[in-house]
Image (cartoon, rainbow, N blue to C red):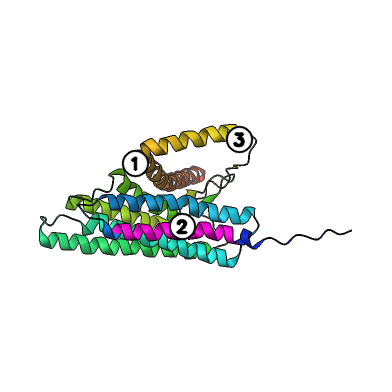
Amino acid sequence: MIERKRPRRRGMFVLPSLFTAGNIAAGYYAITQSLQGSRLEPRHFDYAALAILFAIPFDALDGRIARMTNTTSDFGKELDSLADVITFGVAPSILAYSWGFRTLPMTMDPSLRRVVIELGAFVCFVFLLCGASRLARFNISHDPQPKNPGRPDRKYFVGMPIPAAAGVIVSVVHLVSGTPVPYWWLAAVWIAVVGLTGFLMVSTWRFWSGKEINLSGRHPFQLMVLLGVLIYLLVHFSEVLLFLCCFAYMFSGLAARAAYSAHRRRKKREGTGVALENMTIHVPEEHSH
């Protein structure tokens, strides 16, 4: 007798979407907290940063759960992309603007303050635009390859993923517990940080994806110990740990690109040197009359 395949329950299709809904909820909460934040109430900025950080696991789990339960769909992919635009694009850009520019002290020179705020608003918009473009490119690309390829046994993202870029923004805010930027020159540094993360998202440089990590290995005890240590560190040293992790990931892409460029220049010089050695220069002999 031929056994009939049991149809998958509708709840299996809803489960990944619930994680995506949690992702959107975290982004919406972060936006509302960013709008409530001020120099007198800096905790709202910290709440917004934490909400975006909590959304990163939701974003990682919804796709993984959909693949594990074999419930992937075009609807789920589109919903996930829209959720990422809200949570890791709109919410961080509003937080970056509110925390770094809108709350600059009124004691600053009015003309300088206005210029910094306008420039900061433009850079935050560019960050959002780069994030949306990064997601659109990711959705239409099939097996994209970075311009600086890495090890063949590793998998890489082409450009910095938008959750990682959002992590860079919010880790700075969380590092100072939401205390807004007090000086114009720190606001200028903040403009550079926001602009750099936006550029890295639309770049074609490689960033490690970590997809080759297998969590279903034969050593669950070691994995449980590692997760326990990580949770302990996050609870007690979340400000410093998240800041170091996010910036280390960002600079890993910059270092990979710099190392690849240096390798190409070295290969080019070596090739030029070999070519010169192989050339024979014929000098005509002088004849005496």
From the viewer's perspective, tell me whether residue 33 is left or right of residue 139. left
State the SS at label 3.
Answer: helix
Query: Camera-side residue: 35 or 59?
Result: 35
State the residue at coordinates (11%, 61%). 110
Amino acid type of the residue tagged 1 in the rendering: Glu
Which type of secondary structure does the marked residue at label 2 adopt?
helix
Callout 3 touching callout 2 (CB < 8 Å): no
- Compared across the picture, whether 52 is left or right of 36 comes to right
Q: Quadrant of the N terminus?
A: bottom right
Quadrant in the rendering for residue 111: bottom left
Tell me how far mark 1 sits from mark 2, CA to CA.
21 Å
Q: Quadrant of residue 2?
A: bottom right
Q: Which badge, 1 or 2, comes first in the chain's sequence?
A: 2
- Give the magenta part as a residue range: 14-34
Q: Amino acid at mark 3?
A: Pro
Q: Is residue 143 visible?
A: no
Residue at x 31%, y 57% (from the top left corner): 33
Dominant SS type (magenta): helix
Q: Which residue is mark 2?
A: 23
For marks 3 and 1, the one nearer the N-term is 3
State the CA–CA distance, disc 3 to disc 2: 28 Å
Which residue does the numbered mark 3 point to in the structure image?
220
Query: Which of these two is toward me, 62 or 247?
Result: 62
